[in-house]
Image (tube, rainbow, N blue to C red):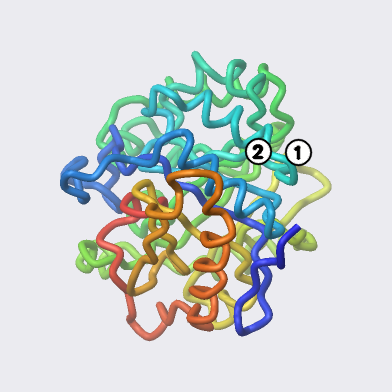
Amino acid sequence: MAVQFEDSFNRKFYYLRLSITDVCNFRCTYCLPDGYKPTQKNSSFLTLDELHRVVAAFADCGTSKVRITGGEPTLRKDFTDIVAMIAAQEGIEKVAMTTNGYRLEKHAQQWHDAGLTNINVSVDSLDPRMFHQITGENKFHQVMRGIDAAFDAGFEQVKVNAVLLKDLNSGELPAFLNWIKDKPIQLRFIELMQTGEMNSLFENHHLSGVSIRNHLIANGWIMKVRSQSDGPAEVFCHPDYAGEIGLIMPYKKDFCDSCNRLRVSAVGKLHMCLFGDYGVELRDLLQDDSQEESLIARIQGALANKKQSHFLDQGHTGMTPHLASIGG
């Protein structure tokens, strides 16, 4: 194995978020309220071979978890082939994806059999009408059937992401808690994050996760210990619940201290942070297998410039126009 990817703050990187497309078929208010518009003119997404070279380089430098993201990653016709390729890579132990769930009902078994180990599904409301209002799509029941299909296919746990939105879904905690009482779902509440195109939405609907955290602790929920390849959620469990609650609170002062993930966009740019100011071009080093040493060297060189924090709490939003642009 080559040297473990590590930055100047002694953070090691075990987790790659690999975007395979920035196209999405939903119109979520906090991401693509006007629908998908191409952000990369005349630029194609990474091919299966190029994606393989990215994954191989990261695996050789200690990465054990790859999350496939988008846009909506399952819009790629070769999605199952991408899952199988990553699962076959020596050193990769977890192959996850984040999805809006619209294709899950039909394909959960196929993806499980190809080597997918973890699924995150976005469900921002358990009220079908509010779900439609937030996502722009009337697909609540289809997505819920997809989650059931994932359990039937053999996934032991499904993670569900819900973006906290004041005055929209902020009153649904009791319904969400009731839903996970008997289902092994890790429900993750994600604070709304300010991006370049979302200033007014952020001002109107941002809600801190602290109130939920306080409610959980007061009602006997206990925080779990985080493993080295876990994402940034603070996860809570309760003896009376089959499910768990995760809180992702990027405006907390120490949020970035445990950063363990890097991002590669669908067009081959390395991003140190979702809210970074630039991307590092990798695609010229993804054209044949002989370039891996140079690819690793470029990534290691870029890590020397990774900042200690995203500085969101100081109003910094970086270059990210919306979350779909580099894989959320």
Question: Residue at position x 26%, y 70% from top?
Answer: 203
Q: Does residue 210 sit above or below 248 in this rendering?
A: below
Which amino acid type is marked by label 2? Ile
Q: Quadrant of the C terminus?
A: bottom left
SS type, badge 1: loop
Check disc 2 and report the residue beneath it: 185
Q: Identify the element where label 2 is drawn.
A: strand
Q: Residue 96, position in %: x, y?
A: 60, 40
Is residue 286 visible from the viewing direction of this image? yes
Identify which residue is drawn at 17% across, 44% down. 42
81 vs 26: above or below: above
First reached walking from the N terminus: tag 2 or tag 1: 2
Looking at the picture, does residue 262 appear above or below residue 122? below
Mark 2 Cα shell of 10 Å, populated few (<14), some (14-19), many (≥20): many
Q: Residue 171: in sight, yes or no?
A: no
Nearer the camera: disc 2 or disc 1: 2
Instruction: Write down the residue under mark 1.
Output: 242
CB within 8 Å, label 2 to label 1: yes
Residue 37 location, quadrant: top left
Total labels drawn: 2
Q: Which mark is residue 253?
A: none
Q: CA distance from mark 2 to mark 1?
A: 7 Å
Vertical order, 180 against 192 (above or below): above
Q: Nearer the viewer, residue 247 or 51?
A: 51
**Is the N terminus in the top left, top right, bottom left or bottom right quadrant?**
bottom right
- The percent position of residue 235, horizontal first and vertical second, equals 69, 57
Name the outermost residue toward the top.
106
What is the three-letter code of the residue carrying label 1?
Ala
User: Where is residue 216 drawn, in percent x and y?
Assistant: 67, 60
Residue 242 % position (x, y) = 75, 38
